[in-house]
Each structure stands twice: as structure tokens, then as C-alpha cells.
Image (tube, grey):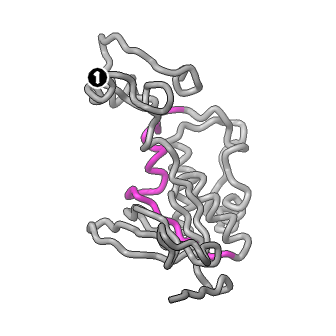
Amino acid sequence: MTLAFDFDSPLPVAVIGAGPVGLAAAAQLLAQGEEPLIFEAGDTVGTGVLGWGHVRLVSPWRYVVDAAARKLLTASGSWTEPDGEHSPSVREFVQIYLEPLAALPAMRSRLRLNSRVLQVTRAGIDKLKDAGRADAPFVLTVQRADGGEETILARAVIDASGTTSTPNPLGAAGVPAIGERQVRDRIFSGIPDVLGTERARYTGKRVLVVGSGHSAFN
């Protein structure tokens, strides 16, 4: 059987993740007259970045607010843009920017919280069939909060899910170091709140920091 699909049909563009990149992508799509559908695995927007909500952003406000998102927020008449030279904490970034953006009717009606995208495939295409792949819409398998699953058709997919939930292993060549799996409960990937919620875990302990990038120095 041959499946035929019309790319001019009103299928949405699926956006995976309702963090800063995902919501900005949705705002840009709306500005272009496209129909976004945003899937967020967490129960609030910015769930991924809130894992390091205590960290202050390196960039000030003027660099972290998307132009299309700013236009939507300004048009609402209920948002006051913060001082462009101030660098917010991630928590402030979510509260002052992402949450008001997600609350706008244009965003709220297209946002699905507690919806985890399990897999993305092409409709009617499997490992043994490749003909017509480029013309077939995407099929997203989405897990709802109640544990049930549903399939959603989309004409394009933007993956803005981030990487914080899938950290790199400590070993070289993309594999865990010897013994890493055995002590996984003693390894924290990211930037722990050592002066706040994680204080008890680190007080009086000798801590090894692996890495030499921004997060490690932070």
C-alpha cells in the first residue's frame, strides 16, 4: 500500500520542550503564520532549566529575550520588560519571562504539559521501507500524565528538549569510566545548589569536579 500525504495540509509543527528555546521557536513559528504544538514532559514550562534555578545567567536580559516572544509579550499590555543590563538567575528568568510567555492565549492553547515525546518516526515508514520518506509526515508517540499514549502527526519537528536530562558520562570516548556505574548515586551532573537545597550533601565533604568548562568553574 502506498500512503500519500499533502504537505499543504494544516498539520502543526511539533516543538519538543517548553524551555527558552522551545517557547522562542513557538513564538517565531507564530510570527511566520505557522501552527506550533508544544510538548513539555514536566508539569511547568522551563522544567529542565529550573534544575539549576539558583545559577545566575552570564548574559543580561537584552540577550536572552527572543524578538518574536518580546513582541507577543509587549502586545499583551501586561508585561514589563526587565532592565536589559541586569543578569537574572535562571529562576527569575523563568518567572519573569517564560511563565508570562506561556500564559499568553496564543501559547497556552498550543502547550501540552506533562506530555513526554517517546519517539519520532515517519508515517508508514519502517526499517525496511524508505520510499516516500521525505513526503511522509512525522509521527510522535506522546506519553500523557496518566500513563496513556497517543500519536500526533506533524509536518515538522523541532527538538528543543535540551541535554540536562542526558548528561555525558565521566569517561572518555562517550562511555562511563570504570566504576562509574557503581557510584552513580554519588555523582551529580550539573551545578548543584551547594548553598541551598544541596547544602547538607556537600558540607564537610571533599568534592571532585570533573570538567573545565563554564559549568565546572561555576
Q: Mark 1 is on which residue type?
A: Arg
Indicate the position of residue 77 as horizontal and vertical percent values: 66, 66
Q: Residue 134, located in which quarter of the rendered image?
A: bottom right
Tag 1 secondary structure: helix
Indicate the position of residue 25 as horizontal and vertical percent values: 64, 60
Indicate the position of residue 76 as horizontal and vertical percent values: 64, 68
Residue 109 visible in image = no
* Prevailing secondary structure class for the magenta stretch in the rendered image: loop
Q: Residue at x 34, y 10 (%)?
A: 206
In the image, residue 21 lies in the stretch drawn in magenta: no
Crowd rating for badge 1 (residues with CA inside 10 Å; few <14, some 14–19, many 20+): few
Q: Residue 68, located in which quarter of the rendered image?
A: bottom right
Q: Residue at x 44, y 42 (%)?
A: 166
Front-most of 166 and 214? 166
Residue position for label 1: 201
Front-most of 38 and 104? 38
Which span of residues is magenta-colored? Answer: 34-55
Q: Residue at x 72, y 44 (%)?
A: 62
- Does 10 sit left or right of 62 as displayed? left
Residue 173 visible in image = yes
- Does 101 sit left or right of 31 as displayed? left
In the image, residue 41 lies in the stretch drawn in magenta: yes
Where is 21 relative to 141, above or below? above
Front-most of 39 and 158? 158
